[in-house]
Image (spheres, grey):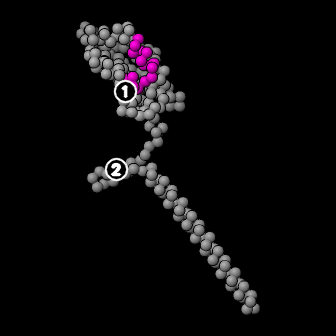
Amino acid sequence: MLIQSLEQKTRLALTTVLLTVVGCSLICGFTVWKAFSLVENERHQIYILDGDIPFLAERANLEANFEMEAKAHIQLFHHYFFNLPPDNDFIKWTLGRAMYMADGTALKQKQAMDENGFYSDIISSSAVCTIMCDSINLDPSERKFTYYGTQRIKRRTRTVNRSMITTGLIENVPRTSNNPHGLMITNWKTIENKDLPY
C-alpha cells in the first residue's frame, strides 16, 4: 500500500512538473512572439515631436501613393514643358527641368519644336505660353496615362487657346533632386494639339 501510494505521488509530482514546464514554455513562447510582433509594428510607426507633444505618423507603402505622385509628376512635367515666357534662358531652364522627368521621346519632341521655330517664334513675338491641366487619366496597373490640358498662347495681337492631349507610360526610377517623385515618363507623344473655337 505504501509503495503504491509513493508511486502515485511520484507520478503526480512528475505530471505536475511536466505540466508546469510545458505551461511555462508556452507562456514564454507567446510572450517572445508577442514582443517581436510589437517591435515589428513599432518599426512601421514614426513619431514626430511638435515641441513636447509626440504625433504618430504612419510609414506609407510606395505603391499606396503611386497614383497621387504619378499625377503630380505628369502635371509638373507638362508645366515645365509648355509654360514658356519670351525669355530664352528661362525656356532652356524649364525644358532642362522637364528633360529630367521624361525619356528621349520628350527630347525628340523638343527638337522637332525647335526645328519648326516654335521657341524662336515665342521669343520674337513676345508670346507667353501657358498650360492648364484639365484632367489626367491614369491606369495604375498598366502605368499608362492620358493628359488633357488647355494651352494658351498669348501674343500682343491675339490669344489662341489650344486643346492638348498627350499620352505615355510611367516607370519608377531612383529619386533625385531633379526628379523628386522618382518617376520617368516614357513613350510620350502628343495625340492632339488643335485650336479651340472662341
Residue 127's x, y, as percent?
A: 27, 12
Q: What is the number of the mark on residue 48?
A: 2
- Chain part drawn in magenta: 98-112
Gap in Å between the C-alphas at discs 2 and 1? 29 Å
Q: Is residue 60 above or below residue 88?
A: below
* Residue 71 appears left or right of 126: right
Q: Is residue 110 magenta?
A: yes
Which residue carries the number 1 mark? 76
Quadrant location of the N terminus in the rendered image: bottom right
Q: Residue at x 33, y 53 (%)?
A: 54
Residue 10's x, y, as percent?
A: 68, 83
Q: Nearer the viewer, residue 102 or 150?
A: 102
Within 10 Å of disc 1 (Cα), the crowding (few <14, some 14-19, many 20+) is some
Q: Is residue 12 magenta?
A: no
Q: Is residue 187 above or below residue 38?
A: above
Q: What is the number of the mark on residue 63?
A: none
